[in-house]
Image: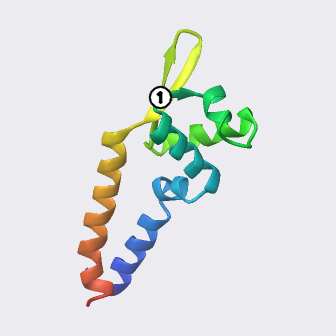
Amino acid sequence: MNRQRAGARIVELLDAPFLRALTETTRLQILRVLLVHGESDVGEIAEHLPQHRSVISRHLRTLEEAGIVRGSKDGRRHVFTIDGPSLVSNLDRLVRETRTLAAFCCPV
């Protein structure tokens, strides 16, 4: 592994869908609602945010695709919750890989 390859891989990690999903203000607000209030449907989340339900639904889809939240059907309701194992696993993987690559491109 050389400096260029390590640096390029770190940039890939930082530009991955997982981190991009976490860098948008509305998505962070949605996460805050789910963390504080627990499992919620779009309407319940919308009660805490200024955005329209359609905007919240779009952001939830992005968070779900990134493995940050999990959606499930509860009768007619589509409820969302934080996917704790996936969230922690993704964060752990990013930290581990970045720590390994940093030795090649940004040594202390």
- Say whether residue 26 is left or right of residue 3: right
- Say whether residue 30 is left or right of residue 12: right
**Label 1: which residue?**
39
Q: Residue at x 47, y 28 (%)?
A: 39
The mark tally for this picture is 1
Quarter that holds the C terminus? bottom left
Q: Is residue 17 above or below residue 99?
A: above
**Rendering quarter of residue 102:** bottom left
Residue 32 % position (x, y): 52, 46
Q: Is residue 81 above or below residue 22?
A: above
Q: Residue at x 23, y 73 (%)?
A: 100
Q: Nearer the viewer, residue 69 or 3?
A: 69
Q: Secondary structure at mark 1?
A: loop
Residue 103 % position (x, y): 24, 83
Query: From this viewpoint, which residue is outermost toward the top?
Result: 75
Q: Is residue 58 above or below residue 10?
A: above
Task: Characterize the local packing of mark 1: few (<14), some (14-19) or many (20 or more) Cα atoms within 10 angstroms.
Answer: some
Q: Residue at x 59, y 11 (%)?
A: 76
* Amino acid identity at mark 1: Glu
Q: Residue at x 55, y 51 (%)?
A: 28
